[in-house]
Image: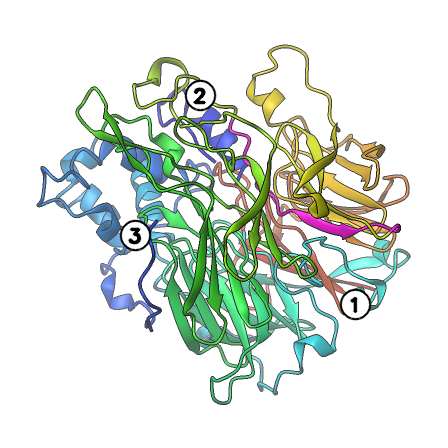
């Protein structure tokens, strides 16, 4: 998810960043309180229009225009980047527009000032003033005690059932059959207040829906009606799917909801009433973030950590690069750190660039995806991002297995070697911060899928951005089983953006025979898990010239669901790929909480299925078009 901020290259880079998509030992967990609305200025700017650059552009603007002072030891009066990250978006925007930074902000467009404020603060403008459930008209009349999450149908965390990240729901848990899917109708819609992007996948547990928002609120809703039980506002936007698990030693609290925010904070909330149990900061790098769901298992919470550091790290004012991806294991009851496993080694000073700014290496290896747990082999699997510096560590662009107990790397399989990527290092914006050869940016952003085949053997599978599906053997230290290209490269330059980014981004689903992935170039593919043979490929004829289907797939017996950047949600037959059902979410909706809401692009999350209902958020579009703020609930009539 990176881009150049130049006028000519901005939208090209934004598009590239939109289809990917997160250092030291941190402090002990601490208790925090909700931010106060009093922190914001009296007059709040209106939210940015849907034609604005994506919020991810904010870090590129900061790296290019601001880091000659902020973070520079020779300018001690300038607040450090980490301090700015703690400010409200209103305070940052006001400083750039009317305050101490007005002279610098004058060189930016208003949209750029908004996006800088939004990214650095980790929440949209105006988000502190609205969103609390107590102010909503659809409050649930009562809050009955939650049933045991393990006792009923659930879609918990990123993958739903289990911790293998297969994103497959059994017929019993789904509460519907393939014959019911064409009968799906909208039952209710819930609007996210002031929301610009619906990018948190809902979890469905004990008849409740738990979901995060870009304004930092976590909501608990009734699955059948959409009435709201409670809300809690964190310190920043949430892209993660909530995970619910039993918790001990917390008094009357039986079950906790675990979420992460854009500031690398993890929260444990009482699933019954939403009060804070604990919070932990898992990484001190100023651009560290959590962009995927924590995985709760056996009393622990496994948290992936990523960054946007490489976004415009070509700027000569930026001390490139010091972030390293990791997985952090926390005690689910207390938030205390048990271990932290890094993808790459500790960054060390290397040389100074032509402006005299110190550079570092190694760096990179963001973990953009939810960890997969292999109970049998006592391992945690993740896909890792590219390197940012040379030489490029072998654990980047790889499947990495960490020891479940210690966090030490057990084995890895590198899919793409030598991928050192930094935004702004192509064309006329290239600087001596850049790698000698700028990489193709082939992060593995999707969670590894662990599946046991009919013959009893196991396989770990990931998809790549350049349209390969890769399967490795977890019993032979990640040895390659097969690798197959599923979408031919377009004619022309093999290194073009369209050639490199035509494939798989956010995740697939697998039954006991096949794995299914939506593809960026539009459509869906099914591949035999045992052999890698392509079973079928469906290209959507009415998807439009720029529509992609990079969102995560969701499967149940006989059916696989995939959504797209055009807002369409489709159900396909797992047998032959024929379309069974289609629904256009890119339109306005009347909502149960009376919030003005509309759907839009669905570029990352997949639908959640449980108890006879299907839930999906619509409106995630990092490029700033196709935004939306609605959660939709469907059931068969």
Mark toward the viewer: 2 or 3: 2
Question: What's the mark number on residue 173?
Answer: 1
Numbered disc 3: secondary structure: helix
Depth check, front residue: 366 or 481:
481
Q: Which residues are magenta?
A: 441-455
Q: Nearer the viewer, residue 248 or 571?
A: 248
Instruction: Report x, y in % for residue 213.
Output: 49, 58
Please report the residue visible at 33 percent of the width from the left and 59 percent of the height from the top. 26
Q: Report if residue 445 lies within the magenta region.
A: yes
Q: Name the residue carrying label 3.
A: 89
Residue 617 against residue 16 in the figure, above or below: below
Q: Which of disc 2 and disc 1 is earlier in sequence?
A: 1
Q: Where, by quadrant of the figure, is residue 568 drawn?
A: top right
**Horizontal side of residue 176 vs 593, given as left or right:** right
Labelled disc at residue 6: none
Describe residue 56's horizontal placement relative to residue 100 as left or right.
right
Where residue 487 appears, as percent x and y from the top left, is 73, 26
- Magenta: main secondary structure: loop
Q: Residue at x 66, y 49 (%)?
A: 585
Give the foreground label among 1 and 2. 2
Q: CA distance from mark 1 to mark 2?
A: 46 Å
First reached walking from the N terminus: tag 2 or tag 3: 3
Q: Which residue is mark 2?
A: 438
Q: Are marks 2 and 3 in contact (CB under 8 Å)?
A: no
Q: Are marks 3 and 1 in contact (CB under 8 Å)?
A: no
Q: Are marks 1 and 2 in contact (CB under 8 Å)?
A: no
């Amino acid at each position: 998810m990176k881009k150049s901020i130049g006028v000519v290259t901005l939208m090209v880079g934004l598009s590239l960043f939109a289809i990917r998509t997160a250092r030291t030992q941190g402090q002990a967990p601490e208790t925090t309180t909700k931010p106060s609305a009093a922190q914001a200025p009296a007059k709040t700017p209106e939210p940015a229009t849907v034609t604005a650059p994506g919020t991810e552009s904010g870090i590129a603007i900061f790296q290019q225009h601001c880091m000659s002072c902020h973070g520079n030891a020779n300018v001690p009066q300038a607040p450090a980047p980490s301090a700015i990250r703690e400010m409200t978006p209103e305070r940052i925007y006001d400083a750039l527009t009317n305050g101490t930074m007005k002279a610098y902000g004058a060189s930016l467009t208003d949209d750029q000032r908004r996006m800088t404020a939004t990214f650095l603060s980790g929440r949209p403008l105006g988000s502190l003033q609205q969103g609390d459930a107590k102010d909503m008209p659809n409050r649930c009349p009562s809050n009955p005690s939650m049933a045991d999450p393990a006792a009923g149908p659930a879609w918990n965390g990123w993958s739903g059932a289990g911790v293998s990240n297969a994103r497959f729901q059994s017929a019993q848990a789904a509460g519907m059959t393939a014959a019911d899917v064409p009968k799906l109708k909208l039952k209710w819609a819930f609007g996210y207040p002031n929301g610009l992007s619906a990018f948190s996948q809902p979890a469905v547990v004990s008849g409740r829906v738990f979901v995060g928002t870009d304004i930092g609120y976590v909501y608990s809703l009734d699955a059948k009606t959409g009435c709201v039980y409670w809300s809690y506002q964190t310190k920043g936007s949430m892209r993660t799917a909530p995970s619910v698990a039993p918790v001990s030693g917390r008094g009357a609290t039986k079950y906790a909801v675990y979420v992460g925010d854009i500031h690398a904070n993890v929260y444990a909330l009482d699933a019954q009433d939403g009060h804070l149990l604990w919070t932990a900061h898992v990484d001190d790098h100023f651009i560290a973030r959590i962009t995927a769901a924590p995985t709760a298992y056996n009393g622990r919470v496994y948290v992936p950590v990523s960054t946007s550091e490489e976004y415009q790290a070509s700027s000569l004012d930026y001390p490139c690069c010091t972030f390293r991806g990791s997985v952090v294991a926390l005690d689910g009851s207390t938030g205390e750190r048990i271990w932290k496993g890094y993808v790459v080694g500790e960054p060390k000073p290397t040389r100074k660039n032509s402006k005299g700014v110190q550079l570092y290496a190694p760096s990179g290896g963001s973990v953009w995806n939810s960890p997969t747990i292999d109970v049998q082999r006592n391992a945690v699997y993740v896909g890792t991002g590219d390197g940012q510096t040379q030489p490029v560590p072998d654990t980047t662009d790889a499947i990495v297995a960490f020891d479940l107990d210690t966090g030490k790397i057990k084995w890895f399989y590198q899919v793409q070697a030598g991928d050192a990527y930094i935004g702004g290092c192509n064309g006329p914006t290239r600087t001596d911060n850049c790698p000698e050869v700028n990489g193709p940016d082939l992060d593995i952003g999707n969670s590894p899928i662990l599946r046991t085949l009919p013959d009893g053997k196991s396989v770990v599978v990931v998809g790549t951005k350049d349209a390969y599906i890769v399967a490795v053997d977890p019993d032979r230290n990640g040895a390659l089983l097969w690798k197959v290209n599923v979408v031919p490269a377009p004619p022309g330059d093999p290194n073009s953006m369209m050639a490199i980014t035509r494939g798989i981004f956010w995740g697939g689903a697998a039954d006991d025979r096949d794995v299914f992935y939506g593809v960026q170039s539009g459509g869906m593919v099914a591949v035999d898990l045992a052999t890698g043979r392509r079973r079928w490929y469906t290209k959507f004829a009415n998807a439009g010239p720029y529509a992609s289907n990079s969102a995560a797939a969701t499967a149940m017996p006989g059916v696989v669901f995939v959504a797209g950047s055009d807002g369409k949600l489709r159900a396909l037959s797992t047998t032959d790929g024929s379309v069974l059902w289609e629904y256009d979410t890119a339109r306005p909706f009347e909502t149960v909480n009376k919030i003005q809401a509309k759907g839009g692009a669905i570029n990352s999350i997949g639908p959640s299925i449980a108890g006879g209902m299907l839930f999906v958020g619509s409106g995630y579009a990092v490029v700033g078009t196709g935004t939306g703020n609605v959660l939709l609930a469907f059931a068969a009539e």
